[in-house]
Every structure is written in C-alpha cells, then in structure tokens.
C-alpha cells in the first residue's frame, strides 16, 4: 500500500476546485509487493479477484478468489488484507451494502492492529450515509454512530483529510435529514453546521502547520471556498418554514443540543443569534 497516497490526493484535490472524498473503489488499493513475495497461484487468484464484475457467475468467481486469498496463510499479509476488503467493494457494487458493512466491521474486529483503520471506518460511515436501496435503509442513529466511532477512535488524526471529509459527509447527511424532516429541521440543520465548522477548523489548522507549503495552503483555501463555504452559506430558500410556536420549541431543543456539545447557555444563545431564518449569515 502506498503510504503517501492520501497526502498526494490531499495536495491535488482542492486545486481543481472539486470535492475530495474517499470512494468505494479507491479505499483499498492493491498492495505493492516484490515479485518473489507471491506464488503463481497467488497471482492468478489476485487477477481473478481484481477483475471486473459481470453477472452472477463473475461475482461468484471474484468472491471465491477473495476468500481463498484472504484465508491462505502462505499469502503475504498485505495481500490477505486486500482480498478481505476487496469483498466490501464487490458487495457494494452488487447492492449488498449490509453485507459490505458487516464484512468491513468483521475485519476491524479481528484485526485491531490493521495498518489503515481510518480508511475502513471512513468507508463504513460513507456507505451508511450515502447508499440506499430497498434492502438497505440504515437509521439516522446508525449513521451517526458510525461517524462518532470514526471521530472517537481517531481523535489524534483530526487533521487527516479522511476525517475532515467525514465531517463534511456527516454534515451533508444531517442537512439532508433536515430537509426531509420539517419538524426537526432547525436542530438537524444546526448540527450539520457544527460538522461543517469542524471541517473548516481542521483545514485552517492544517494551513497553520509549520511544514505547510504555499501550494498546500492554496489548495486548502480552494477546498474551503468550493467545498465548505457553499454548505455554510447556502441559499436561504432551502429549508421549510415552521410556525412560530414550532420555532420556539426547536430553539429550546437546539439550545439543549448545543449545551450537550459543551457550550454554556450564553455561548449557545450567541451561536443561534448568528442565524437569520434558519440560515447562517455570510461574512
């Protein structure tokens, strides 16, 4: 696995002015191994497991190859890891997201020493937040719990781009929930704002690091401009307008939520006062 892949992605993602995010297809790149590290049989299994999907038979062949590689004690550890997590990709591509999440979590449970657990937890949270089908409808608490686990397990990696993008992902999910649930729109919307602000603080902290180059700072500025600010300062017509009585109840509920986040009441009131009609005022 390329240790510097995330740094390279982070350096280039914002200069193009586009959102950066880990995806199902790239969270588990094939490991780079010496030629002599694998047998011809391992090479054949890898070729099959890494092949394209095309019908039930192809899917079955890919899954069997992944299983055989993952369970082969003579295969390199990095290749066994790749094969086990390749199943997550295959299962998502075939709309079996529940199995994909279960496979990823099972790997983490059995391998607490995994060299890159952030990527796995990030992809679990992303699957739960973004993918929906007739057989896959995770609840809001399930989505929030997945992100919470990522943030708590990797609190020391708060400036990692995967964690930053996870805050953006959770913010987008909560904003969507706000639009879909008018009776809860204000507290959900403000929770989403807190996530976007957390992402903003992390990017600004990256820019303040002693080793941050001018090119990296420019990339961070572009990321803020194109990927964070549109969520912090959106159109004022995005949320439904509740009644005055409902607004008062939601304000109290939101104040309670903010105080549970660690703010005292005065600070929570001040935070809410920055909002006009449910939308933050742009600077």
Image: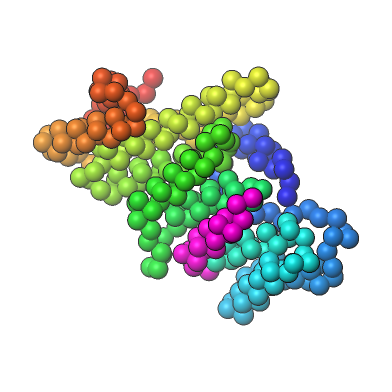
In the image, residue 24 sits, relative to residue 264, either above or below, namely below
Of 153 and 279, nearer the camera is 153
Q: Which residue appears at 64% of the width and 63% of the height?
A: 84
* Total labels drawn: 0
Pinpoint residue 72: horizontal percent, then vertical percent.
73, 69
Farthest-out residue, right: 36
Chosen colour scheme = rainbow
Q: Quadrant of residue 178?
A: top left
In the image, residue 194 sits, relative to residue 113, either above or below, namely above
Farthest-out residue, left: 245
Left-right relation of 91 to 245? right
Pinpoint residue 134: horizontal percent, then vertical percent.
38, 68
Left-right relation of 89 to 239? right
Look at the image and tell me in which quarter the C terminus lies.
Answer: top left
Left-right relation of 272 to 123? left
Q: Which residue appears at 11% of the width and 36% of the height?
A: 245
Pinpoint residue 203: horizontal percent, then vertical percent.
54, 28
Q: Main secondary structure of the magenta part?
A: helix
Q: Which residue appears at 67% of the width and 37% of the height?
A: 7
Q: Is residue 110 magenta?
A: yes
Q: Which residue appears at 38% of the width and 33% of the height?
A: 194
Q: Is residue 141 magenta?
A: no
Of 265 and 32, nearer the camera is 265
Q: Is residue 222 visible?
A: no
In the image, residue 152 sits, relative to residue 74, either above or below, namely above
Tell me where the magenta segment starts and ends, as one range: 93-113
Pinpoint residue 150: horizontal percent, then vertical percent.
50, 44
Of 135 and 221, nearer the camera is 135
In the image, residue 172 sits, relative to residue 276, either above or below, namely below
Q: Is residue 34 visible?
A: yes
């Amino acid at each position: 696995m390329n240790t510097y892949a995330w740094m390279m992605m982070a350096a280039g993602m914002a200069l193009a002015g586009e959102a950066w995010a880990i995806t199902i297809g790239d969270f588990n790149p094939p490991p780079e191994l010496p030629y002599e590290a694998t047998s011809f049989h391992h090479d054949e299994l890898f070729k099959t497991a890494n092949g394209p999907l095309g019908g039930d038979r192809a899917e079955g062949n890919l899954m069997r190859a992944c299983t055989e590689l993952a369970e082969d004690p003579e295969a390199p550890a990095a290749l066994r890891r790749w094969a086990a997590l390749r199943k997550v990709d295959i299962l998502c591509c075939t709309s079996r997201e529940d199995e994909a999440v279960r496979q990823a979590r099972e790997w983490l449970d059995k391998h607490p020493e995994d060299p890159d657990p952030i990527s796995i937890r990030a992809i679990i949270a992303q699957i739960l937040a973004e993918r929906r089908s007739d057989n896959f409808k995770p609840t809001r608490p399930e989505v929030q719990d997945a992100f919470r686990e990522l943030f708590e397990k990797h609190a020391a990696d708060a400036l990692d781009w995967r964690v930053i993008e996870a805050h953006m992902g959770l913010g987008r999910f909560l904003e969507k929930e706000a639009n879909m649930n008018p009776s809860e729109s204000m507290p959900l919307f403000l929770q989403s704002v807190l996530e976007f602000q957390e992402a903003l603080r992390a990017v600004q902290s990256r820019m303040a690091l002693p080793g941050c180059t001018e090119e990296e700072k420019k990339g961070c500025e572009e990321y803020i401009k194109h990927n964070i600010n549109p969520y912090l300062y959106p159109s004022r017509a995005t949320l439904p307008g509740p009644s005055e009585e409902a607004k008062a109840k939601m304000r109290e509920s939101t104040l309670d939520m903010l105080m549970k986040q660690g703010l005292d009441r005065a600070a929570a009131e001040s935070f809410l006062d920055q909002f006009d009609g449910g939308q933050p005022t742009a600077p």
